Image (tube, helix red, strand yellow):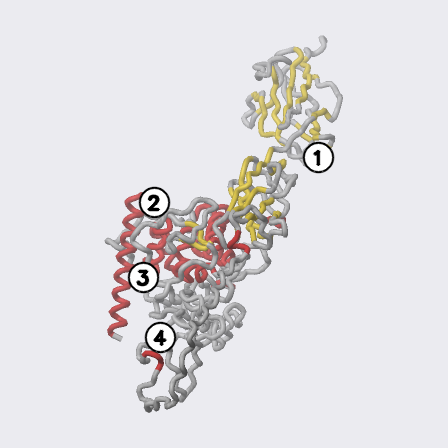
Amino acid sequence: MAAYLGRRLCKGAATTAVAALAVAALSASGAPGAQGVTDSASGLQAADNAPGFQGGDPSATGDSPYYTELPPLKSPAVPPTAGESANGGRSESGIPATVLDAYKRAESSLRSSQPECNLPWELLAAIGKVESGHARGGQVDGNGTTTSPILGPVLDGNGFANISDTDNGAFDGDSTYDRAVGPMQFIPSTWGQGGPDGQGWGADANGDGKRDPNNIYDAALAAGRYLCAGGRDLTKAPQLRAAILSYNRSTEYANTVLSWLEYYREGTHEIPDGSGSVPRDRSDGGTGGGAGSGSGSSNPRSGDDDNTNDQGNGDDKNDKNGDNGDNDKPRSPSKPGATPSPDPGDPTEPPGGVDPSAPPTTPPTTPPTTPPTSPPTTPPTSPPTTTPTDSVKRLANASGERLTATAGGSFAGAAKVRAQNASGDPVGKVRVRFSLVGDTDATFPGGERVATVLTDRSGIATAPALVAGEKVGRFLVRAALVGRAVRTDLPATVTARQADALVRTGDKELICVPGAPFADAVEVKATYKGAAAARVAATATLVTSAQDATPNDKGPHFKDAAGKPVRTLTGLVTDKDGLLRLPQLHADDAIGTFLLRITTTGGATLTVELKVEAPPAT
């Protein structure tokens, strides 16, 4: 016990020291989070010292165990260029492709819905690293759902918080106590009940109609919403720290997360799904079966030994038992009165597994068999199996013409890429994820910004039909191979709505006397290729002459809110039927024929005559 306490104290001191360096770096650089650090070197605050769960509302994780591994002291490795494999990159700074995409999508979503929060995706990455090692090193399918559930220990008050069941086992499989669930380790009461809408903090970020805590897209967005709660501004250090402590009320936890946050801000890169490293040491002194380890035991109250879903720490891909990744030998569950079999990794077991208390074995009396005269034949070595995904060298643009659309309309063509191997041959049945990058409100069907499809026999992956929004400009359709750092960008453009013709809806002559308003308003209809041109931008100007388009300084005019003359109106837009009705026109003391010119996006122009005549003599 003394040795264990000493190890934990050393780890706590190291964590605090690294966090101090992180805070100091933030302060020196002027980066977000540098303001408001009030304590000494570590930046700790008095509120941090509350020891774990104190009753009342639990934290997001129920203060479950977490991984205590700290980032390396050296800066992250330089990320690979686009299309280059990242297998050779530093595993500490690399984040599995799907998991990284989920963190960045959550940041983008919250930038729109809660811009005042200023949530950085690196904070989600830091928490995801500490909670589950980025979903066990990226063990997720193409939709972002973990390959097996990730469950924390039973929160029965035995070394952890005591939280009775709140979801009837719907999320964690335990109808007696709660357990933290998923790559971001939400407890069911927080996921399903504790949110601002009464439906919990859980989110459906991938549009599949489910709020799944084991889906990294759903979990990352839910974590972002939780961290932004209460109108926090995460560029302010006290509010950033308060957000982290609301997730798990432990000073060491906050320091560890801050260390990874600063590390990821220095740089990171994509690595293939499933290839990430998973931490070993947990805050409860364990190396598996707890926070983020996937301890989905058949006896959900144990949380220690699991022969069903536990993925261990991911260090041994051949681990069949899922205990700690150190060996393949399945362990029998403990029973009262039964003597457990020695573990191959147990240092008390002698080499070769021989029991020293067993009686000596009599050596055989049969003489050994004479060895064969010819040397044995070495069986041929089987070449390593290569999956279709492994064989993809590049994604080539197969869309043909450039992707263009008018605002509010559909794109004429679809985004397509061809998966090719090193020889240029097509690769079928691999997953390609299409995502929209840039300032655009274009979407795939259903309002989605991400779509994952399989390539066909010819290696072609065709994205769902894109629908343009109202934002005009360029953006990218990014095609990325799921599980590999191979991608390509397809440019797309949304152009403004256009009209190619303008006509007056009436033919009545527009006449008034000096100093009076015109009795009839000017109304026009815009069309494009014979159809009504809805929501087309237009400008109306009282021009000097047919040859001079500068605004006239006399004659008819519009009026602003203060009643002052205005001779140019901008920002006009036709309605759904292509109609545009101008504000009332007024005449000054000038007499004569004047011109009103109306132009639209697309080049349609109409000139209307306005006459100001002296009143008849009495």
Residue closest to the far front: 373
Work out how far the residue at label 1 is from the one at label 2, CA to CA, in angstroms. 50 Å
The residue nearer to you, when weighing 318 against 322, is 318
Q: Look at the numbered disc 4 and give the secondary structure of its residue.
A: loop
Which labelled disc corresponds to residue 345? 4
First in sequence, mark 1 or 3: give its number.
Answer: 3
Q: Residues within 10 Å of mark 3 (few under 14, many from 20)?
A: many
- For image coordinates 48% across by 77% down, the residue present is 299
Residue 549 vs residue 184: left or right? Answer: right
Q: Amino acid at mark 3?
A: Glu
Measured from the top left, where is residue 319 in percent x and y? 44, 70
Decide which of tag 3 and tag 2 comes sooner along the chain: 2
- For numbered disc 3, what is the local secondary structure? helix
Please provide percent x and percent y for residue 439. Answer: 52, 40
Tell me if residue 103 can be seen: yes
Query: Is 557 left or right of 43, judged from the image as shown?
Result: right
Q: Earlier in the sequence, mark 1 or mark 2?
A: 2
Q: Which mark is residue 252?
A: 3
Looking at the image, residue 326 lies above or below residue 356: above
| 519 relative to 148, above or below | above
The residue furthest right is: 507
Compute the Cα span from label 3 to label 2.
22 Å
Residue 70 percent location from the top left of the image: 32, 58
Query: Can the viewer see residue 57 in this picture?
Result: no
569 or 514: nearer the viewer: 569
Numbered disc 1: secondary structure:
loop
CA separation in Å, label 1 and label 4? 77 Å
Sequence order check, earlier mark of 4 and 2? 2
Q: Kindly identify the residue that appears in the image at 40 percent across and 72 percent down.
A: 327
Badge 1 is on which residue?
577
